[in-house]
Image: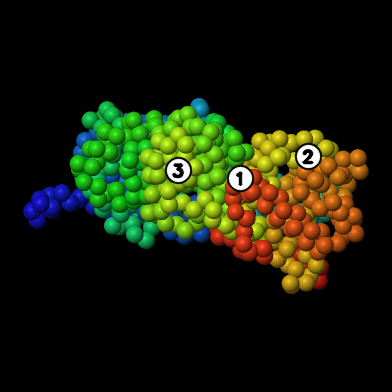
Amino acid sequence: MSTSEQLEESPEITPQVLHITDLLKWVRKGRVRVPNFQRDFVWNRPRMLDLFDSIRKQYPIGTLLFWRPSTRYPLRNRIGPLRTPDGDENPLIVLDGQQRLTTLAGVLLFEAMDTEENDSDPGRWQVYFDASGAGGGDFVHLKEPPSPSCVLVRDMMDTLSMYDLVSKMMESVPDGEDITPQAKAEARKERSEWVRRVQRAASAITSYRIPIVEFATDNLQLAIDSFKRLNHSGMIIGPDEMFTALTYLAEGEHESFALATHIDELVHEVQRRGFGEIDRVMVLRAVLAAADMDPYRTEWDRLGETLKTSAREKLPDAIESAREGLILAIDFLRGENVFNERMLPYRMQLVALGAFFARCRAPTDAQRAVLRRWLWVSSFTAWFGSGNPAKVRRLIEVLKDEVAADRNATSIKDFDLDAPAEPFPKRYDLRSARVRALVCALLHDGALGPDGTALSPKEVSRQVLERGPEAFARIFNRTTGDPSERWMFASPANRILDVAPDVRGQAKNWLVELDSAHASDIFASHHMPESADGLLRTDDRTTLLTLRLQTLKRLERRFMEERGVTPPIVDEPTLSALDVEDDAPLADDLVDDREP
């Protein structure tokens, strides 16, 4: 390409800074639209609140990137819960920043525009500012009717609404014969502080300015490439969004292929089957594996036109193949009592299994046996923890091309099925694949509730899906104060499935109240040592945790041996690597006996 041709291909880039109020006007007029190839709104409630907190504190929230082609593209008719009008012949198309834009528009314009009736969580758009919160106030979602200190954030954007809010706050000062003059004065002072906080927060939001960059070009790949170059220090577009955009096909306003839509459908289908919300990137990798493409490739902007055309031709069939493979893989995992994605030691195990089942829909007993052994060996040996894409890529090729074709398979090329397991984990942390493998062993046979009711493996697994790390409660919240023993109180030995969530505090509180007629069976179902009852009542924490650690090691060893996994060579517990993030807090709030 000549220099003049390169210059002609260069996009027209216009950076500017826009007040939030002006950005909202753009949304209301339909000047800003979301393209069909973008994913749905996926932010959870805490991330939405964090965005408003950052704005209140005047922190930067990143640049919004818009694409302005001269031709029409298929566009969504909504931004989050808001129906957007066709008000602009050549609207700005959101290339990056959709989650931030949707949060702002959805919360601040919810009552000013027409909204969708089928929103899965309409309450998330009702964000309040609680002026009584520490540190100048908090942004919150409410379950109960708002207290006098809480105001809807969108009401803070309007002068008349603000006047009413201030009046109602000051009118909420308690009155009555039983209220002393001093109490009334303190209440008025408190309300005055609330008003100041609301005014400061409102001013921070209405005056906040957001940087935007506008790319004017008809070449979507050029816009994305320019975005990547500008965005090295910011939030980089995900590989699923990158690949989706570069394989997107549309003629005028008629869409012919959008991978994002199919990825969304696959994610939702897996959710409907109760397996939880799998990562979109994992779905993309499953599709790429089914299309015989590199599941780890990220530099999609360097994909040549020939390969892009080839990818577009392969993808429709690959999507259906990946869907069938993933569903069969989930059925296989359920047969191993791995009922949801939060129990799965490694996400790439689902991709690898999906690649196999996409090629082999009805495996023989021999193939199932080798898959079963591979699943647990890779889990307990931390095989995927090496982070070596070449190894994983080769494994997927072997599973779908060789093992799927060998009806009598007993081994997997280049994979050591006899490798010893990693040592028992020293610390309970559900972000570790090694800990998740232990959890699979702990919950494999279900458990008994505090009244002796049997809970199936599927029921106890649902607790892990819904509650994450908090599904396992501490037996003891206080250590002995001996520094050499503190690690035991942070270990899996000090965790038990929380089958009595209504009992506050440490699990010991409900364990010592068990009916003696069921106590021994309940203890056994939770893998507690035989002497647990007496040790709990005498508060012999060190002995109980020492014995339970040995009990869990024996349980895990049996579990491994039944599945063809070589037990650990090292007997001492060791710290295990963290492999994934988790939403639930993991604060270490243990208290020593010697502390007040």
Q: Residues within 10 Å of mark 2 (few under 14, many from 20)?
A: many
- Locate residue 556, reporting x and y percent: 67, 51
At 49% from the left and 42% from the top, the residue drawn is 410
At 86% from the left and 62% from the top, the residue drawn is 540
Instruction: Provide the residue designation for mark 2.
Output: 448
Could you tell me if residue 209 is visible in this image?
no
Q: Residues within 10 Å of mark 3 (few under 14, many from 20)?
A: many
Disc 1 and disc 2 in contact, CB within 8 angstroms: no
Q: CA distance from mark 1 to mark 3?
A: 19 Å
Circle nearer the N terminus (1, 3) = 3
Circle nearer the N terminus (3, 2) = 3
Instruction: Provide the residue designation for mark 1.
Output: 563
Type of amino acid at the residue the image marks with label 1:
Arg
**Relative to residue 322, is residue 506 drawn left or right?**
right
Disc 3 is placed on an element classified as helix
- Locate residue 575, reporting x and y percent: 61, 63
The answer to whether 456 is drawn above or below residue 170 in the figure is above
Type of amino acid at the residue the image marks with label 3:
Ala
Instruction: Provide the residue designation for mark 3.
Output: 352
Q: CA distance from mark 3 to mark 2?
A: 34 Å
